[in-house]
Image (cartoon, rainbow, N blue to C red):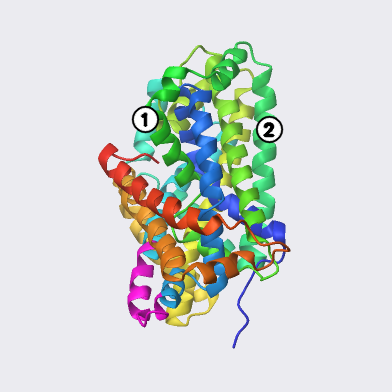
């Protein structure tokens, strides 16, 4: 039997998991929600939920993957095999896999935008417009149907080539370069913004606590959504990365590091973007693509050294996005390998060709595409993985897997906390997302 690919080092695995978690949610959504929901009044519940999900869901998905040494389809099948229902488990496991593929396809469109703006920050085209209407028109043209084919395909090709190299030589090495570079570049931006006139108002806002906002249920709901989606809990990416781990790794410790650095990335983004907006007395009240591709370029164009700022910013964003895209594609690629018996390169090529066709076709509807996935499929996938591991596999099995690689047993509160708190949270996120039109 051919030896399964794996990570070569502990930090290679951790950086890859951090790369999967650090993405657009940290950069274009977290700062906006901090701004809209009272600064520190939002950060407090956000940190509470990060600790809760980091100490339950992330550990669970990593452990489930390592225990079964497989992606979601075979992992769910192995769980249900205990009840004589392996085929049913495998069928359910397709839900997070297909969700991961669909999310990767949508994310590929976004990565095409980011790659174009990153290259354009060097050539000057990114900051070429003269006002916010010009930036809006440029983005609208790019984000229209079939409006960015070449850059989209280039971004996809980069991701697929990295994936073709495998887990240790491709995913791990790419994350070892891109994740440290991302943090370094954002620290540089943070230091630059620190010395800009008016930035202090932004810092004061970030760390103030508004009692009214803290009591508002919406603050807590959106903090839950932000933490949940930022930590990439969806029954696919974290699970598949966990499947490449050795039994010597301490999963709870690794999960803690992932949650810490993901939170650090979000805070760095807020410490750059909110004070930068404050230098122009502008309130940050719009997140998503509009913030990144319209308002920030307009802001950078008016700043001293704006070209350099744009280069640093979009290169950093490119690294964060690419590491997330790689993770999203890994689960479907691994599933194609497992179920169709293909080797690594043909599996990557097959998934890449299919994704190229679909991503080109959905450019004009990608916003609705991503909303549908984040509202329905991601929390459903996370909930199904949690049920399989914590309810179907049972306490003895779960605790054995979580404690593998540890010198001391993990807290006895872990299993009941996951079974009776984390599992319901997954479905609460699903329901709240449906009712409120998305909270991620």
Q: Secondary structure at mark 1?
A: helix
In the rendered view of the protein, which quadrant contains the C terminus? top left
Q: Is residue 416 visible?
A: yes
Q: Position of residue 404 (x, y in %)?
A: 65, 68
In the rendered image, which residue does mark 1 sit on? 218
- In the displayed structure, does residue 377 sit left or right of residue 45? left
In the rendered image, which residue does mark 2 sit on? 187
Q: Position of residue 222 (x, y in %)?
A: 40, 35
Q: Which residue appears at 36% of the width and 46% of the height?
A: 429
Q: Which residues are magenta?
A: 80-96
Q: Position of residue 37 (x, y in %)?
A: 44, 24
Q: Quadrant of residue 249?
A: bottom right
Q: Find out whether residue 323 is within the magenta segment.
A: no
Q: Secondary structure at mark 2?
A: helix
Asked whether the beta carbons under mark 1 and mark 2 sit within 8 Å of each other, the answer is no
Q: Position of residue 234 (x, y in %)?
A: 43, 56
Would you place residue 182 above or below residue 328 in this image? above
Dominant SS type (magenta): helix
Q: Find out whether residue 86 is within the magenta segment.
A: yes
In the rendered view of the protein, which quadrant contains the N terminus? bottom right
């Amino acid at each position: 039997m051919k030896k399964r690919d794996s990570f070569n080092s502990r930090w290679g695995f951790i950086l890859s998991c951090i790369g999967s978690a650090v993405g657009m949610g940290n950069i274009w959504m977290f700062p906006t929600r901090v701004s809209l929901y009272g600064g520190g009044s939002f950060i407090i519940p956000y940190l509470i939920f990060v600790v809760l999900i980091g100490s339950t869901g992330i550990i669970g998905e990593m452990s489930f993957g390592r225990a079964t040494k497989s992606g979601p389809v075979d992992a769910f099948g192995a769980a249900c095999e205990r009840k004589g229902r392996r085929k049913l488990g495998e069928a359910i496991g397709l839900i997070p896999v297909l969700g991961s593929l669909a999310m990767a396809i949508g994310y590929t469109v976004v990565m095409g935008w980011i790659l174009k703006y990153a290259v354009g920050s060097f050539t000057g085209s990114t900051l070429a417009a003269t006002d916010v209407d010009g930036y809006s028109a440029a983005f609208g043209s790019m984000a229209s149907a079939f409006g960015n084919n070449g850059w989209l395909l280039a971004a996809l090709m980069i991701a697929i080539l990295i994936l073709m190299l495998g887990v240790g030589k491709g995913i791990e090495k790419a994350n070892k370069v891109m994740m440290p570079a991302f943090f370094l570049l954002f620290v540089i931006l943070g230091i630059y913004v620190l010395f800009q006139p008016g930035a202090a108002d932004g810092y004061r806002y970030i760390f103030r606590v508004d009692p009214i906002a803290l009591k508002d249920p919406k603050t807590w709901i959106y903090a839950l959504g932000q933490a949940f989606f930022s930590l990439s809990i969806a029954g696919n990416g974290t699970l598949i990365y966990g499947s490449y781990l050795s039994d010597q790794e301490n999963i709870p410790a690794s999960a803690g590091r992932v949650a810490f650095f993901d939170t650090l990335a979000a805070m760095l983004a807020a410490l750059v973007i909110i004070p930068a907006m404050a230098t122009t007395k502008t309130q940050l009240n719009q997140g998503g693509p509009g913030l990144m591709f319209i308002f920030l370029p307009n802001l950078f164009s008016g700043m001293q050294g704006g070209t350099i700022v744009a280069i640093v910013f979009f290169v950093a964003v490119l690294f964060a996005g690419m590491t997330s895209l790689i993770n999203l594609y890994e689960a479907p690629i691994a599933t194609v390998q497992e179920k169709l018996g293909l080797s690594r390169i043909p599996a990557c090529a097959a998934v890449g060709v299919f994704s190229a066709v679909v991503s080109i076709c959905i450019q004009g509807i990608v916003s609705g595409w991503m909303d549908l996935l984040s509202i329905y499929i991601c929390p459903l996938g996370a909930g199904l993985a949690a049920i399989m591991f914590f309810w179907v596999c049972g306490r003895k099995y779960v605790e054995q897997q979580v404690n593998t690689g540890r010198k001391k047993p993990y807290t006895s509160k872990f299993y009941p906390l996951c079974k009776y708190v984390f599992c319901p949270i997954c479905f609460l996120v699903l329901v709240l997302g449906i009712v409120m039109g998305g909270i991620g």
